[in-house]
Image: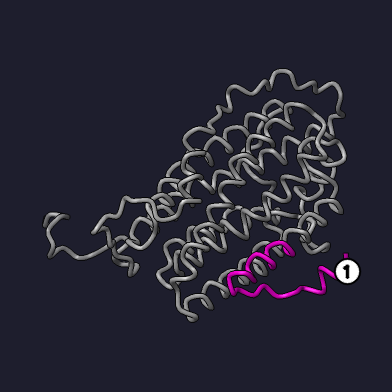
Amino acid sequence: MKSLYDPASPQRGLHALGLHESRFPLETRAQAPSIVELWKKSKTMTWDPCDIAYATLDRSKFSQEQLDAARLCWSRRAWTEYTGIIESPAMLIRMSLDGKAPIEAKFVLAAKVVEEARHCEASYMLADALGGYVQEPPPHDAISRMVVAGFRDRMAFNPDVSTEAAMAGWHCISEGVAVDIFLARYRWTEEPVTKEVLRLILLDEVRHVQLGWDYLEHRIPQMTKAEIDAVEAVAVDIMENVEMKGFHSMSLLDPSVESALRDAEEIAGHAKLGFCPAAMEHQAFLKSIQDLRRKFAKLGIRIPVYPEIEQAA
């Protein structure tokens, strides 16, 4: 067998995808001060899901229907956060192949892998405290295809999608929408343990979103119009075909689509167990779209107006 390290060996893996490493010269000096600050925060703002006082959650205050709904919804949070454990390394690998990317952004992404893992752990531990973690979605539920879609790792390993486009679609849009919805849920939630889990996850997610914006602000001035247009195309695609299809807000699912998860979120929302009523969540989503549109416009990227959603609210 020919050695895998023989230069004459067939090229597989990332090379087969058209991705090649450009490491040297390895620039370790800070290039983006705002991202350096995010790296500092990543090193100091740590927390352990096992330190949360799950045992103090008083289930006697809620009906069985509310508890079952909430544990299903928090199980869904664990399934979704688990995707971050896959997708964050994918994005880190892609950015590490790129010699132009500031190294401090790569450091922040390396920390993000651990942060997504603790979000997953905290979510399933909360589901357990609510009555038991659910290992998989109900059969044929609409959420099944959303959870396993893997759109972000497909962006990270797609040579036709630039690192900047992937960051715009994932960190700025997808995680930006998630933060706005999480914030609405945090303000609505009253149960103390659940509120603390939301608070701690938000601390991390805000940094993840900020990384996307800081990275784009650093890179956009160095890019051609064609490259910026390609970022815009990916951003619009993620907005229209992922977020507006209900990935983070199931209130956007077509009413004709049956989903036990959507129904459970409504029940858990009225119980104030980490979710909020659909109408309130939808308002948070609309605000997110409008904020994203303004921020992207400053970078020369256009997010369309969606009157069928925005004017109907």
Q: Answer above or below: position of 88 versus 123.
A: below
Q: Is residue 183 magenta?
A: no
Magenta range: 289-313
The residue drawn where x is 57% and y is 63% is: 169
The residue drawn where x is 33% and y is 51% is: 29
- On the image, the x and y values in percent for residue 214 come to 53, 57
- On the image, the x and y values in percent for residue 34 come to 50, 51
Picture colour scheme: one colour
- On the image, the x and y values in percent for residue 187 come to 80, 40
For disc 1, the neighbor class at 10 Å (few under 14, some 14 to 19, many from 20) is few
Q: Answer above or below: position of 266 versus 44.
A: below
Q: Is residue 303 magenta?
A: yes
- Out of 299 and 262, give the one closest to the viewer: 299
Query: Left or right: where does residue 127 sit relative to residue 312?
Result: left
- Out of 87 and 210, give the one closest to the viewer: 210
- For the C terminus, the quadrant is bottom right
Query: Left or right: where does residue 120 sit relative to residue 310?
Result: left
Q: Answer above or below: position of 270 versus 309.
A: above
Image quadrant in which you'd find residue 45 = top right
Image quadrant in which you'd find residue 122 = top right
- In the current view of this chain or complex, which residue is farthest to the top? 56
Image quadrant in which you'd find residue 298 = bottom right
The residue drawn where x is 77% and y is 48% is: 260
Secondary structure beneath label 1: loop
Location of mark 1 (residue): 312
- In the current view of this chain or complex, which residue is farthest to the bottom? 226
